[in-house]
Image: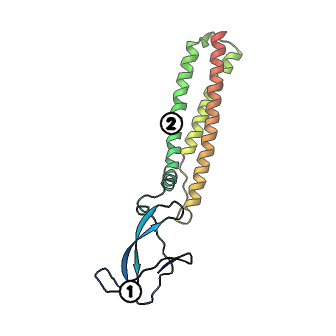
């Protein structure tokens, strides 16, 4: 007899024999179950004792193939956990390249728009974007700075979380500075273009 949640589900009848299927724990039976929620049928192998009067009080079974198909969300979370630090580092490297490339491009556009003819306050206003581009680049470099500290299995999770939070703050700050530099540059270019 197989009981699940205190209710009798299946009753097995027949002589208990010591056939080739019977091992030290009992005899193997292929049993078909119907899922009470979905109504789908699935089979599973149940080992029943061959001793007279023995009872199986609980059976836990899963649909065939469920072990081979893990929940995709668990795999996705595991992948994100593994790749999050690498994604942040790759982004910082990209932004360091963008910040350093923005400087000569900025000055080339200023020369094209006729910076030589600008005087007084306009010349001073052109210093804002390069300073902001440099500051953003420095912040992204700081985000990549290695942190030297002792680590073991007990502290690895806390150290990793602290490192990711620090990197995230630096990335956010660098993006703000880079965005300010871009906005300042565009306004300045438009003013120089239309003056």
> x and y percent of residue 161 in the render?
59, 55
Secondary structure found at label 1? loop
> x and y percent of residue 94 in the render?
50, 36
Q: What residue does disc 2 label?
A: 94
Give how far apart the Cα atoms at labels 1 and 2 are: 68 Å
Q: Name the one closer to the observer, 115 or 164.
A: 164
> x and y percent of residue 100 in the render?
53, 30
Is residue 61 among the parts visible in the rendering? yes
Figure label count:
2
| Residue appearing at x 62%, y 12% in the figure | 193
Name the residue at the right extreme.
121
Q: Name the one closer to the observer, 162 or 69.
A: 69
Tell me which colouring the rendered structure shows: rainbow
Is residue 127 among the parts visible in the rendering? no
Q: What residue does disc 1 label?
A: 50
Quadrant of the snapshot with the C terminus: top right
- The reply to whether dot 1 and dot 2 touch (C-beta < 8 Å) is no
Q: Name the one closer to the observer, 74 or 89.
A: 74
For residue 162, what is the image quadrant?
bottom right
């Amino acid at each position: 007899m197989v009981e699940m949640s205190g209710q009798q589900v299946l009753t097995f009848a027949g002589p208990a024999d010591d056939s080739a299927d019977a091992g030290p724990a009992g005899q193997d039976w292929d049993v078909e179950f119907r899922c009470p929620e979905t109504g789908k049928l699935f089979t599973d192998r149940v080992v029943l004792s061959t001793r007279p009067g023995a009872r199986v009080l609980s059976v836990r079974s899963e649909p065939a193939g469920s072990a081979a198909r893990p929940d995709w969300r668990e795999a996705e979370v595991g992948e994100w956990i593994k790749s999050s630090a690498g994604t942040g580092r790759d982004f910082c490297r990209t932004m360091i390249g963008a910040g350093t490339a923005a400087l000569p491009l900025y000055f080339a556009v200023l020369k094209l728009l006729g910076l030589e003819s600008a005087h007084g306050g306009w010349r001073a206003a052109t210093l804002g974007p390069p300073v902001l581009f440099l500051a953003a680049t420095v912040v992204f470099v700081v985000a990549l700075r290695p942190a030297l500290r002792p680590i073991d299995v007990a502290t690895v999770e806390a150290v990793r979380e602290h490192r990711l939070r620090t990197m995230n703050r630096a990335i956010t700050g660098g993006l703000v500075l880079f965005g300010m530099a871009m906005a300042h540059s565009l306004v300045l270019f438009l003013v120089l273009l239309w003056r």
